[in-house]
Image: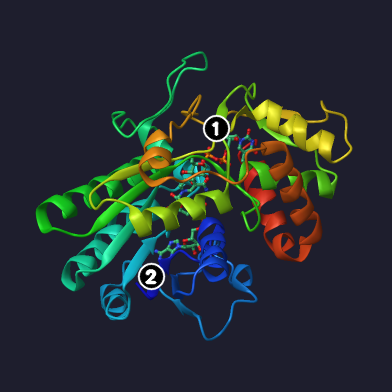
Amino acid sequence: MRRLLVTGGAGFIGSNFVHHVIDNTDLHVTVLDKLTYAGNLRSLDGLPGDRFAFVQGDIADAALVDSLFGDADAVVHYAAESHNDNSLHDPRPFLDTNIVGTYTLLEAARRHGTRFHHISTDEVYGDLELDDPARFTETTPYNPSSPYSSTKAGSDLLVRAWVRSFGVQATISNCSNNYGPYQHVEKFIPRQITNVIRGIRPKLYGAGENVRDWIHADDHSSAVLTILERGRIGETYLIGADGERSNKEVVELILEEMGQPRDAYDHVTDRAGHDLRYAIDSTKLRTELGWMPAYSDFESGLGATIAWYRDHEDWWAPAKDETEAFYASKGQ
Ligand code: NAD
Ligand code: DAU
């Protein structure tokens, strides 16, 4: 394996993965990204020209995808419409990219016999009760709640069908909530950090009791590289770092770390259908493939993320006003 094609590599997790691969392997990386509102070429600044190439385009463009698969030994598929709130207001792009886009890539993988890794989410499993001791495993039944998570669930099922029916050499990973550098300001953690920097009070949906299982994006990248190198074809691996926190706890940590009173936030209109709790059991990945997260301490990872947003206002400022205007129009 010498040449990787990474779809969605100008987005949050994709760009973290590209930096991780360039820093930790000798692979050549080509990124295919449409540069939607969520893509940012500046997230790929500083990569070496002799090991990195960028192609702007749509994963649903079959001719373009076919030409790029011809030059790739393996494909890692991150490209997606990724934001639940957007999917509640305008689901159509989620169907086009997450379903039709993934189908287009799978057909190319089938034609070219290319190794394919599909990036997915723990949200395909629905949610858990707050007091349930259970966590998601690879055998938890699918039960998605939102237009976003249902299109991700659909894309996972397409991958499984293309493995079984057409022999496509694919693996799937379902990861929990990521945090770290290069995350769009529409998402929970960067929204609150950049709100505090701008003097705006953080916004908590509903009572703030919902729980997410946080993992640093760099740990997600090391897990994906491990699966690409050693994962068994046709298998699904859950990725998580035991980072369960309620949204209220996260907002309070951000405020404390940024020198503000811990209660200086507002409760706003809750998200429709808001999943209560996600929690990942990543035993299979850890025992079968020997993967371990490097960021065992959420508080220090969050501190480093706050520092990154403080130092990179030029990266996030262009999207901030429009994002807040959108939320304000929804009472959030
Ligand atoms: P993101 O929204 O930050 O980035 C998505 C990227 O895909 C952008 O660069 C965008 O331009 C590109 N893109 C969108 N539509 C495209 C198309 N039709 N053709 C080509 N490129 C297109 O998303 P993210 O948070 O980095 O998520 C990346 C992947 O990881 C997604 O598949 C998501 O479901 C999955 N995931 C995300 C999380 C999380 O916490 N953010 C957790 C688990 C899994
Ligand atoms: O679990 C993995 C998923 O994590 C990924 O599949 C998605 O692509 C990713 O966006 C993320 O989904 P969430 O909906 O959990 O993330 P979001 O950052 O939108 O919200 C995290 C939690 O914070 C959620 O319970 C909603 C809440 N929230 C969000 C925003 C933007 C707030 O309380 N206030 C906010 O302003």
228, above or below 190, in the image: below
Rendering quarter of residue 144:
top left
- Expressed as whole percent of the image width and height from the top left, the position of residue 234 reads 23, 49
Name the residue at 51% across, 13% down: 131
Name the residue at 36% across, 37% down: 284
* CA distance for labels 2 and 1: 35 Å
In the picture provided, is 162 more to the left or to the right than 273?
Answer: left
Residue on which disc 1 sits:
242
Pick the front one: 51 or 307: 51
- Expressed as whole percent of the image width and height from the top left, the position of residue 176 reads 49, 39
- Expressed as whole percent of the image width and height from the top left, the position of residue 140 reads 31, 28
Rendering quarter of residue 139:
top left
Picture quarter with the N terminus = bottom left
Pick the front one: 272 or 84: 84
| Callout 1 amino acid | Asp
49, above or below 103, in the image: below
Q: Secondary structure at mark 2?
A: loop
286, above or below 14, in the image: above
Residue on which disc 2 sits:
58
| Callout 2 amino acid | Asp
Residue 146 seen: no
Q: Secondary structure at mark 1?
A: loop
Picture quarter with the C terminus = top right
> Is disc 2's CB within 8 Å of ligand 1?
yes
- Expressed as whole percent of the image width and height from the top left, the position of residue 207 reads 64, 21
At label 1, counting other C-alpha atoms closer than 10 Å, the crowd grade (few under 14, some 14-19, many 20 or more) is: some
> Is disc 1's CB within 8 Å of ligand 2?
no
20, above or below 230, in the image: below
